[in-house]
Image: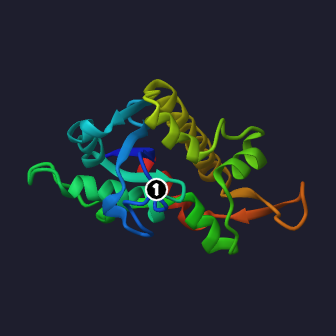
Amino acid sequence: MSDTLVFDIETQNFFTSPEVGWDNFGALKISVVGVYSYESDRYSCFEENEMPALVELFHRARLVVGFSSNRYDVPVLNHYFQRLGESSRLNLWHKERIDLLEEIEMASGIRVSLNKLAEANLGFGKTGHGSEAIALYAEGKMDELKTYCLKDVELTKKLFDLYRERGYLFVPDRQNAGEVTKVNLGRRIASANATLF
């Protein structure tokens, strides 16, 4: 186990869908999972029926990185991994994880969107909104959906790289447009760099 993965999931439905209900993670259905592997320096995207191949990537990972992943991506994906055969089954909660949004919240008490965080630190943001991903799936536009998902993975990876290099990220101030707060995240940097290198 030596790889570090950055990942993001998109779902076919959401908590507000009639058949789901709030916090009912087991009723959420994955459309695609985008992944970046540091070991292979490669982006990949997996559909719902490709979970056996995806879980092999996660089995090899020492660290998994996401954005708001502990609140959404991990519990949803973990339900899928737990339903696999015994030889493939994986509990994601047992993996070392870094959730960039959670790190920012713990350090500053601020919640921020991936789009706003990317704009403040990278100079560019997302290409669309999460609700559009559900529509793309419903319309069968899988190539567009995968492109959208992998863009989020790319933004998360670039922010994670900055986090490792600098030990801080700029977080937009909700009260004052155009103002940013420098949030130090050094607490987990040494661990992340040791895992990667």
Image vertical order of residue 187 relative to residue 134, above or below:
below
The answer to whether 141 appears left or right of 78 in the picture is right
Q: Amino acid at mark 1?
A: Phe
Q: Is residue 197 something that shows in the picture?
A: no
Quarter of the rendering containing residue 35: top left
Q: Residue at x 18, y 55 (%)?
A: 83
- Extreme residue toward the front, this view: 18
Secondary element at tag 1: loop
The answer to whether 84 appears left or right of 122 in the picture is left
Residue under pointer 1: 14
Q: Is residue 88 something that shows in the picture?
A: yes
Badge count = 1
Q: Residue at x 49, y 43 (%)?
A: 134
Where, quadrant-wise, is the C terminus in this rendering? top left
Image vertical order of residue 146 relative to residue 119, above or below:
above
Residue 119 is situated, as x and y percent measured from the top left of the image, at 75, 45
Residue 184 is situated, as x and y percent measured from the top left of the image, at 69, 65
**How did the renderer colour the structure?**
rainbow
The answer to whether 147 appears left or right of 115 in the picture is left
- Extreme residue toward the top, this view: 143
Q: Residue at x 29, y 41 (%)?
A: 57
Q: Residues within 10 Å of mark 1 (few under 14, many from 20)?
A: many
Residue 105 is situated, as x and y percent measured from the top left of the image, at 63, 70
